[in-house]
Amino acid sequence: MNTPETQKNQAAFLETVDLRKHFEVGGGFLSGPPRMVQAVSDISFHVDEGTTLGVVGESGCGKSTMARLLMGLIERDSGSIRILGQEVGGTEGMSLREARRQMQMVFQDSFGSLNPRMTIEGSIMFGPLVHGVSRADARRRTHALLDRVGLEPSRYTARYPHELSGGQRQRVNIARALAMEPRMLVLDEPVSALDKSVEAQVLNLLLDLKEEFGLTYIFISHDLNVVQYISDRVMVMYLGKIVEIGSVEEIYDDARHPYTRALLNAMPSMDPAHRTESAPITGEPPSPIDPPSGCRFHTRCPFAEDICEKREPELQEKQTRRAVACHMEHPGSGHSQVGSSRHDQ
Amino acid sequence: MIASKEKDRPVVPPEVVSRGYWHGVISRLLRDKVSVACMIILGAIVLSAIFAPLIAPGDPTVGSVLERLKPIGEPGYLLGTDELGRDMLTRLLYGGRMSLITGVVPVTLALIIGGALGTIAGYVGGWTNAVIMRTIDVIFAFPSVLLAVAISGALGAGLENMLLALTIVLIPPIVRISESVTTQVRELDFVDAARASGAGSLTIIRAHILGNILGPIFVYSSSLLSVSIILASGLSFIGLGAKPPTPEWGLMLNTLRSAIYTQPVISALPGVMIFIVSLASNLLSDGLRSAMDVQR
Amino acid sequence: MFGYFAKRLAYAVPVCIAVSALCFSLVYLAPGDPLSAVLPADASQEIIDDIKAQYGLDKPVPVQYILWLGRAVTGDLGTSIGSGRSVALEIGNAIGNSLMLALFASIIGFTVGSFLGMIAGYYSGSTTDKVVSAIAISGVSIPHYWLGIVLVAIFSVELNWLPAMGAGAGGSQEWAWDWEHVRFIILPAITLAAIPTGIVTRSVRALVADTLSKEFVTALIAKGLTNRAIFFHVVKNSAPTALSVIGVQLGYLMAGSILVETVFSWPGTGLLLNTAIFQRDIPLLQGTILVLALFFVGLNLLVDILQPLLDPRISRT
């Protein structure tokens, strides 16, 4: 389907349109109707090939759910996912199995990210074996990957996860993902559990691998510094919605959405010339079960007005590839601050 | 703060030969004197049961009423004779075989059936889980003794019927624990990673889930061995189960009841055997649990 | 909290129905004609059909079930083939005896078990602890019907202190707290109490040892609290757990008493079950199993509801 939208995004490796996932919680016999956790609501974005899209947001904003939706680990309620223009799932286009050859996921290092009863070699070989690669080839590939991520095969293949440090385990996670020879990696908080020095090593490894294999990344993190370091474009999420998306310079130097600004301001500023001055975020983060009406951020926004409570701002494109979901950025929305230049950074 | 691109230099682990999980468990178990003693005792009983035909002095079903209730130490009858003149030592040894059967067979069958049901329920979740677990709950609503008696009673006395009854009684707890452990393991990220690599459910269960659930399920099932043996002997005691002249410890306790006035020690012997087997397996089960508790 | 109770109650209803179905159908597992116990071997077809109709066995099984269930709900469990009396009456007589026995055993289990458990836990690791733990695990491992036989051998046969069987004249209907009646229940109650005592001991011991090892107790000792005060504190903590353990055990004791009752010829529901099985007394069998199973379900429900009240550490949302 060649709409003007898709034409614009021809270079996109991955594209989602109105992706949605709501979970039922509670309910059942004698507890009343179930309530809906609106984890991911109508998310539309794209990622260009060979680039890194950073995804930031607080806990509960839906980033992990979105990652699992992309990988097909959770079934989406509605919306579409397209890889290289082809629809994933559904009757035409790519099957989920094929899609999984294109994308793989790297999980946060945790006790459960690697099978504690399986050797490192076994964990990495599993994927290729499932897809019919011969044992010998799979082993060869495993050893090559271990070497490439900085773990000497002869020392590590027969080990178990509990014998490795956090950084080493993450390298194994990366090797496992790459064993499928994907073209894109979805990384869900891959360095959050690591010490800072180790974090730097793993990030650099990821950058090197991206160069070498021509990979595309979706990098999810709550750490703004890390995201700035590694991303080409950045997407900001709040309560299951995208509030702002743009290049890393646009987001970090010229954030437009009040939430983005607040997040950035919460980062300690290193530059004495640009001290933190904007109003901080007030109030408790609402729960995704009963999100606020209209603009979901309006309960904590210092610029909120009536229109913000009534109508939800769309994620409109502004200039090229840059979008902000805020009434202040949309001429004709009725917000009093439309068009005013606010440089209170 | 963000580091410059320094060269990767991961830490090299010390030269330790990698050991599996079970190795640690077994070595800890072997260091516990009580557990070792239990293993030796149970091992001896199992061996003597298996080799009973070779080592037993007499025939378990043949006896002469003239020789009835001879005391312990009587020449030719090391542990005396029972109420029908059969050699007690022989009967006890063969009784061990019966107990072995009544312990191992139901537990093994229940493990296979219950383990499969529980794992499927845990992995698939949703409706399948609900149906399986609710059905099991209904069976679980009966206390085990009552259920065993009811099924045996309905089917009639006899060894096969008793084994069937015991299997049915043992299936629900095994399903419960399999389902619970599988559900826990299924939540872990590496299972998601396996799913993300495109593997089918059966492959994932075989390669990833089983290895992680067999431990606790196995240990639990082993604790059911003595339960099964005791239930079986109880059933035989009231006449449901092994039929005379089968040498079975519970049955022997029944038939020797009247002998309690003349030869109390002999009539107590089968009970002693049941007690030893049960005690040893309970102690061993405790020991195994502590050995597994200490995670690395 | 209320919602949880309501849920549990509502959930129990389908369970009870399913249980009743299971009870009913158990009997039809048996090979052979359920009527074989009643009929003489050479009865003519006419007589067979007659009796079948009388017992309602000529209708299809599901219909029989509904009819049976309908009657059961009103308290009519049919007539015992063996005795000719109403099944409900037989069970009614017997259940009082079993309940009495179970209660006695529970009390023994609770008191002795708690006491032993506290001692073992208090002196955790010492010889006393080891001895008590050995006793406890022996209690759990022993085939209790065998214990009964042994006790009978010692106390009835050898010493002639206590009767070997029966519940005395009148059983629970004419109970009095005098030696004449109490002496009948001593041995059976002790026998039945062996396993729950062992279980309570182990549970209490674990709890006490765990509580004492907690840091706040060390802090209390450091503050100079006497051993006595600590002791009371520990007792307060372990009582709810022991109670809930016994509560659970009570159900098993009631429903699983058949072996002990057989040894002592104690006229309870267990013995009734025994009789029903060997006489192939279908209505009695169905009725007894049903009552016992429902009792067990009801008791578990009660324990489930009371448990959060007794032991505040267990919370139910």
Image (cartoon, rainbow, N blue to C red):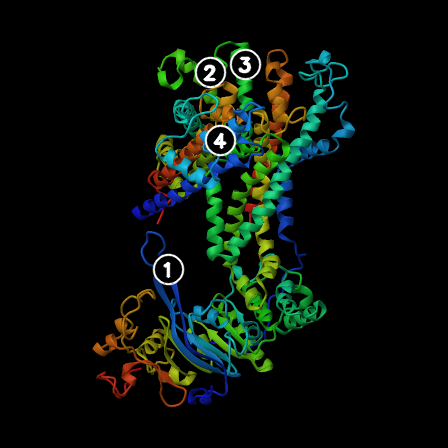
Provide the chain ID for the residue under circle 1: A
- Quarter holding residue A96: bottom right
Q: Residues within 10 Å of mark 2 (few under 14, many from 20)?
A: some
Q: Amino acid at mark 2?
A: Gly
Circle 4 or circle 3, nearest the eye: 4
Same chain, marks 2 and 1? no
Identify residue for label 4: C52
Measure the C-alpha gap from mark 2 to mark 1: 57 Å
Provide the chain ID for the residue under circle 2: C
Given contact means CB atoms under 8 Å apart, are the residues at marks 2 and 1 in contact?
A: no
Would residue B16 be found to the left or right of residue C286 on screen?
A: right
The dot on residue C166 is: 2
Q: Residues within 10 Å of mark 3 (few under 14, many from 20)?
A: some
What x and y, as percent, mark residue B191?
Answer: 54, 62
Identify residue for label 3: C154
Q: Earlier in the sequence, mark 2 or mark 4?
A: 4
Q: Amino acid at mark 3?
A: Ile
Provide the chain ID for the residue under circle 3: C
What x and y, as percent, mark residue A42?
Answer: 38, 75
Identify residue for label 1: A25
Circle 1 or circle 4, nearest the eye: 4
Q: Secondary structure at mark 3?
A: helix
Q: Amino acid at mark 4?
A: Lys
Q: Earlier in the sequence, mark 4 or mark 3?
A: 4
Q: Amino acid at mark 1?
A: Val
Same chain, marks 1 and 4? no
Q: Earlier in the sequence, mark 2 or mark 3?
A: 3
Measure the C-alpha gap from mark 2 to mark 4: 36 Å
Q: Nearer the viewer, residue A57 or C177?
A: C177
Q: Nearer the viewer, residue C50 or B34?
A: C50
Asked whether residue C155 is in view, the answer is yes
